[in-house]
Amino acid sequence: MVLSVGASAVVEDPGHNGIQFVQNLHYDMTKRIPIELICAKDSSYAFSKRLCSIQGHMSPGLFESLDQSGILNPLLAKAQPRQGEEVQLIDGFKRYEWARKKGLSEVAIEVLPADFPDVQVGLFLAQEHFHVIGETVAAKALFISFAQGLSLELSDMVETILPAVGLAPHKSILDKYLLVSRLADDVLAFCHQKAFSIKRCINLSYYDPHLLAWLMGMKEYLHLTASVCEEILDAMNDIMKREKLSFEEVLEKEELLEVLSDHTLSPNQKTTRLRAALRHIRQPTLTGINEELEDWRRKLERRCQGLGISWDHSLEHDHINLNLTVTSLSQLQETLEKLEESASLEAIETMLERLRA
Amino acid sequence: MQALRCITIEPGLVQRLKDASLWAKKLEEAPSPKLKDYRKGKRHLHLDIKRGNLFHLCASLDPKYICCSTHVTAHVSNCPFECTYCFLQNYLTDTTLTLVADTDAILREIRSQIAKEPWRLFRIGTWELGDSLGNALICKSAIELIEGFSNFPNALLKLRTKGALVEPLLNVEHKGRTVISWSVNPQEVVVREEIGTASVQKRISAMKKAAQAGFLIGLHFDPMLLFEGWENGYKDLVHQIFAALKPSEVCWISIGSLRFNPEMKKKIETNYPRSRITSQEMVLGDDNKFRYVRHVRVRMYRHLLNCLTEVGADGCLLYLCMERPNVWKALFNQPPKSIGELDFMFAHSMYRRFPKLDFPKPSLEAYLKAAEPLYEKRN
């Protein structure tokens, strides 16, 4: 039977221990109720469903376990203010789904009174799902956004919810995590999968959502780390701004089309070539000069065995470094002779001239 | 924090303030609101006492570059203007526009510092964290500093602004010990990237008035920005300025280009999403600053130097800001080889070009020796 309107259990303030609070009420609240009186799909407390958006769907293993043993623990729900309304499911969505599939007419359920504080429900859910929430920034952000959806007071959000997910109780931290929570589901899922830091997640929130959506669409074909994501997004962003193009127009550039349409490339190869193509478009002067220097380097190193040439690829410094690797005196003499030949000297002079502005 | 004293505002100055009632309130003793929001901080002026030492070498000084080794006194913090490229948006923890009201204490500190090296010509700016003449109250403070500096035998006060607020200064007895300088950019850059600042025309008009009042003038083409038509933009700017000023009225001209650290890029893009300054081709150097590629910078600087030569301004002391020796070498026949040498060049230029101002005769050896600790610190 569902608790009637107005009935509430008189309990001591449990402090910030949601699970214990629920356990204290257990013997009063557990009932068997018809499954159709349970609101699951549209429940305000369906956090585990939100978790699926970043975690993926439930593994079949749990259903098998339920097949074997049935529902061992009662579900948890909260009564509605008006008598006769469905109870809102808080915990046990997977068990509920299994029970529906099995055609069960009733389930055991603990029903919290209608005036049970939502902040305590939030606390309970935080603890219940801490093994996931505690893992990543994205999961924390998701939970904080969910908790905000319960219309909690700001003080409850800062002083109860933040510590419950392992964060310091400051409004600035709440603001940061809410900013991250506004990322699209697939982006948030990606952040969760890659365990991005709060800084990385916030950085992603600055980009055009269409650009982000495109990159997420490419994640199967590219090898994306946090820094690679930022590099690609930054490059696309800069090119779009500088050339006043939409991102679709940027993608139509020949160098990019060539890479993106080549299906023979592995994710690593595709990523390397995409980054190189973006660098070329974004930094034409820098890449142009470095490419010229590379040509000369290859020529010289072929001429002079054991010679290694390097320079500052940012072109801030205008010197080149010559390194000699020798295994014998005769090799050293031979390399030095080759270096002194006019062709070698001309090549070095050309490189130095190119480095001089 | 309490204001040490109230600064008297003459009616003419008050009229220039946007919100006179706000300033009147701030003249009373009040604690600093310690604001965090960068823009909000610009609208709240707090008058503060002098806290600790304000006098130091410019924080940008780096032995990797040939720096001008200017000194600063940090008596203004934050700025009423809003330039998209301003480093303050990423730097200030307390964004409240703050003015140290106790100019006597500032002058006492400076007097004791410059007395330690009477052979040196100190160049001391008030612009490190703000605009030296950003509003009427800051101007009032600047007047007191000008009067104080007029008696210093071996120091120049450097005021630097993007405004046009010079009227209050024109009748002040400065005795040639104050340089008023302007940061300048083509008008289309001013409109897009230097929000709230005076137009180029107004700045030039102010320069002319200041020059006529006998102030030495400085020019800072910094930061130069790349944009479509930049060459004509800067050429026209130079010609506009030198149609109004004589090169003999200009004591120095600095040149620099856009630079910022990686955190600033995000800040600029967030605060000013329409600005395109961060999307130009830039490269991260080993000093952790984004800059235009060196070859591009040299091209920009060379173009500007050619324009300055065209108008006869190449006799002024021309120098680069925060650039390595290789950039100097690409542009000047006889570039300074060190920070000490550039410091000497300033002193020598002032001594030679403005003999009536009776600056101390500089010794290259003294300046080179004084700069040695900077290099030892790096090593």
Image: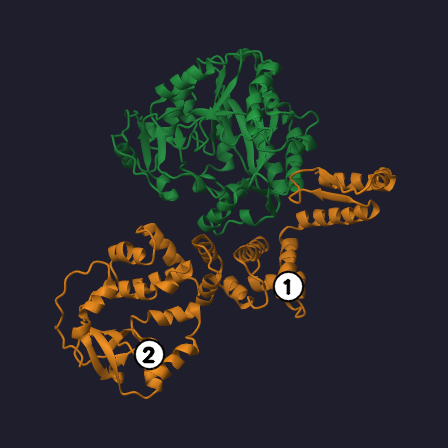
Residue B173 shows in the view:
no
The tag earlier along the polypeptide, 2 or 1, is 2
Q: Is A238 above or below relative to B131?
A: below
Q: Could you give the CA–CA distance between mark 2 and mark 1, rounded to whole angstroms?
A: 43 Å
Residue pointed to by mark 1: A270
Q: Which quarter shows the C terminus of chain A?
A: top right
Left/right of residue A65 with respect to residue A227 in the rendered view: left
Q: Position of residue B89 (x, y in %)?
A: 44, 42
- Same subunit, labels 2 and 1: the answer reads yes
Residue that appears at 28% across and 36% down? B22
Chain in orange, by letter, is A
Tell which of B256 and A138 is nearer to you.
Answer: A138
Question: Badge 2 sits on which subunit?
Answer: A
Residue pointed to by mark 2: A95
Q: Position of residue B143 (x, y in %)?
A: 39, 22
Chain in green, by letter, is B
